[in-house]
Image (tube, rainbow, N blue to C red):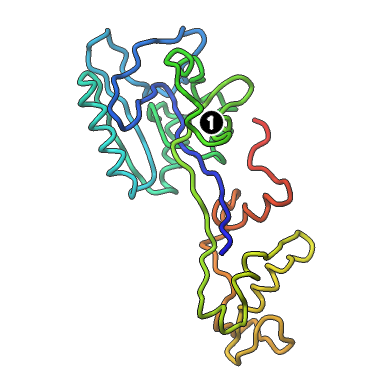
Amino acid sequence: MKKVSILVTLLLILGTVLSACGGAAAPAAQAPAADAPAADTGAAASTAPSGDAVTIEYWLWDSNQLPAYQACADAFMAANPNIKVNITQSGWGDYWNNIQTGMVAGTAPDVFTDHLAKYPEFAAKEQLVDIQPYVDADQVDLSVYLGQLADLWARDGKRFGLPKDWDTIAIVYNQDALDAAGVTLDELNSATWDLESGGTFQELIAKLSVDENGNNGLSPDFDPTKVKQYGLIINGAGEGYGQTEWSWLAATTGWRHIDEL
């Protein structure tokens, strides 16, 4: 079947950049303070002389990823015994409320997982640190990222984060439903969509939608109040960015999540 890929890069840096899961030593080079002013979050990593202990607060929303994050933090702390990493995880809704409240109250974390649809607002309010000087000082190889993933976090000569991951979104089909409707995989793979008519993709959805009397959505007798089988199911409305719901359709019109801060 046709798969639709969508970029969702995550990881926004406030004050301190952690190394990757490999457990490499913490960067020694420091960029000039004037070139990388710290955001006034009130929860920045403790400033201490070289060798003294510091604590970094890191927040994320995905409980499924928490074990891997903790393993990375454990490896990092083993390689850097003077740095302690505290990880806090909370659900999606509470997570963003806590971040926004923390920005105002001065209790935001030092490092947190962010979203492309969210970070421009923080950047516009100057609540994020420009980490480009640190990227330059430690010679971070941005070529390891696919395509322009790293560029999505850079605006106006400043860098507000580095990619952590991205999602590949796929349409999953039910072979039995396709067979019953007489729809082939070739039809599904070659489906088209446009803003005005919906294209053959919309026709396929209608054909796969069946009411309690066995009429599909293309039949004049189809009863939309008694649907037995829906031709397409999505997991919610997608809020303002439709990550797994509608952004892949909107993207075909040239629409972009972010064009400027």
Q: Which residue is mark 1?
A: 150
x and y percentages locating residue 128 in the rendered image: 50, 25
Q: Which residue is at 63% across, 69% downward?
A: 186
Q: Nearer the viewer, residue 6 or 97?
A: 6
Q: Position of residue 242 (x, y in %)?
A: 58, 53
Q: Tell me what residue is drawn at x 68 percent, y 67 percent.
A: 201
* Image position of 174 with respect to 22: above or below: below
Outermost residue on the right side: it is 196
Q: Is residue 83 left or right of residue 209?
A: left
**Secondary structure state at the residue bearing disc 1:** helix
In x, y percent, where is residue 214?
60, 90
Q: Would you say 212 lies left or right of 97 here?
A: right
Nearer the observer, 143 or 45: 143
**Three-letter code, disc 1:** Ala
Residue drawn 62% across the image and 53% down it = 248
Residue that extends furthest to the bottom in the rendered view of this protein: 213
Q: Quadrant of the N terminus?
A: bottom right
Q: Dividing the image into 4 quarters, which one contains the C terminus?
A: top right
